Amino acid sequence: DTAVSQTPKYLVTQMGNDKSIKCEQNLGHDTMYWYKQDSKKFLKIMFSYNNKELIINETVPNRFSPKSPDKAHLNLHINSLELGDSAVYFCASSSTENSPLHFGNGTRLTVT
Amino acid sequence: EDQVTQSPEALRLQEGESSSLNCSYTVSGLRGLFWYRQDPGKGPEFLFTLYSAGEEKEKERLKATLTKKESFLHITAPKPEDSATYLCAGGQGGSRLTFGEGTQLTVNP
């Protein structure tokens, strides 16, 4: 009964391709997030969704588009992948804005 | 701009050798200071939230403390299974959290 699950775990693709990462949480949380972790382990917020509405977008290129069909799911679609997009992408959720984050196990994206 | 700095970047301890990890922060409107543990290939796992200076929280061999400028994660008599990267984060909540770079802790048996 994984709380926050994301698929796939690994994604290897070529520059220019389009790919999606899926995320689901079964915690009943209202807010979901996408974070990017670079090679230096820094975690940076990309998007936040509160009950299916986007509430933040931290200067992420518009090649990245989050989609939330319902409050338990938050998918990330990436168009025209670039080498610099290689990173680990984490989905997370929280019950409120000030509550601790619950993270998935990440998707390691490698763009060649 | 909010900033969270962790030190040291890496720490090697012998089993049973107690030590502390540091998290310095300059965050406007801090609503909470969070500590997470991250194992290789996994997502960060929540450990503690501290809300005000002077607050302390404990869990097994870990104790987190908070001042107005820093937080410490004290590890007492660590075991090899405590080896992980420890992350701290501060801010106004989930969408406004600033993470530090983490301290990679290795505990040798």
Image (tube, rainbow, N blue to C red):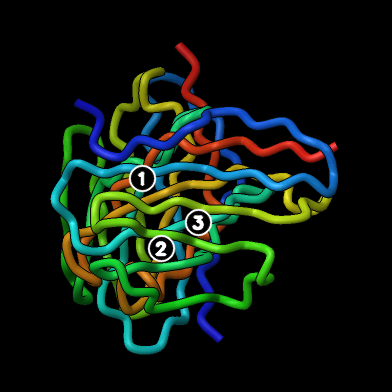
Say which quarter of the image contains residue A36: bottom right
Q: Earlier in the sequence, mark 3 or mark 1?
A: 3
Assign the C terminus of chain B to one quadrant of the image: top left
Q: Is residue B7 shown to the viewer in this render?
A: no
The amino acid type found where label 3 is placed reads Tyr
Between B80 and A57, the residue placed more toward the observer is A57
Could you say which disc has been placed on residue A35 in the image? 3
Query: What residue occupies the far front of the structure in this picture?
Result: A69
Between B4 and B10, the residue placed more toward the observer is B4
- The count of marks equals 3
Callouts 2 and 3 in the same chain: no
Q: Label 1 to label 2, Cα distance in Å?
A: 14 Å
Secondary structure under tag 2 reads: strand
Residue B65: x %, y % from top left: 26, 60
The amino acid type found where label 1 is placed reads Phe
Residue bearing the label numbered 1: A103
Say which chain tag 3 marks: A
